[in-house]
Image: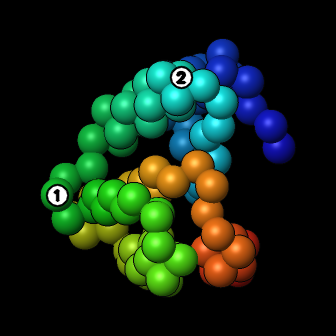
Amino acid sequence: MELTPAGFDQEIKEAKFRPAYYLFGEPATTRAAAASLKAAIAPGPFNLDEFSGESGAEAGRVVSAALTPPMLSGRRLVIVRNPKPGAEARQALAAY
């Protein structure tokens, strides 16, 4: 389901988080959206994983991090920065 920027902002303000977000568009806009999501969730160091997404081999680590339960928190945040994952990464993420 597509979410408008205004709808995204509203959900973040209401702390109604979805299991996953795929942010796309202008780089400045997506960076701002990711920053607001990160600020709203406020994951501790044990509940935040950030990946460049440059390597297809990294996709397995991304999925593993996403499947790891949060530690001493209700939420976990996994950020993948590559806007164009390769075929191998798309398959792994789709399976997730």
Q: Look at the image and tell me whether residue 30 can be seen.
A: yes
84 relative to 27 in the view: left or right: right
Q: Position of residue 24 (x, y in %)?
A: 65, 37
The answer to which quarter of the image holds residue 8 is: top right
Q: Position of residue 40 (x, y in %)?
A: 37, 33
Q: Residues within 10 Å of mark 1 (few under 14, many from 20)?
A: few
The answer to which quarter of the image holds residue 1 is: top right
The answer to which quarter of the image holds residue 46 is: bottom left
83 relative to 37 in the view: left or right: right
Picture disc at residue 45? 1
Name the amino acid type tagged 2. Thr
Q: Farthest residue in the top direction?
A: 6
Q: Residues within 10 Å of mark 2 (few under 14, many from 20)?
A: few
Q: Is residue 43 above or below residue 70?
A: above
The one nearer the camera, 38 or 17, is 38
- Residue under label 2: 29
The one nearer the camera, 73 or 53, is 53
Q: Position of residue 18 (x, y in %)?
A: 61, 48
Identify the residue at horizontal 32%, vertical 32% (top origin): 39
Q: Is residue 59 above or below residue 31?
A: below
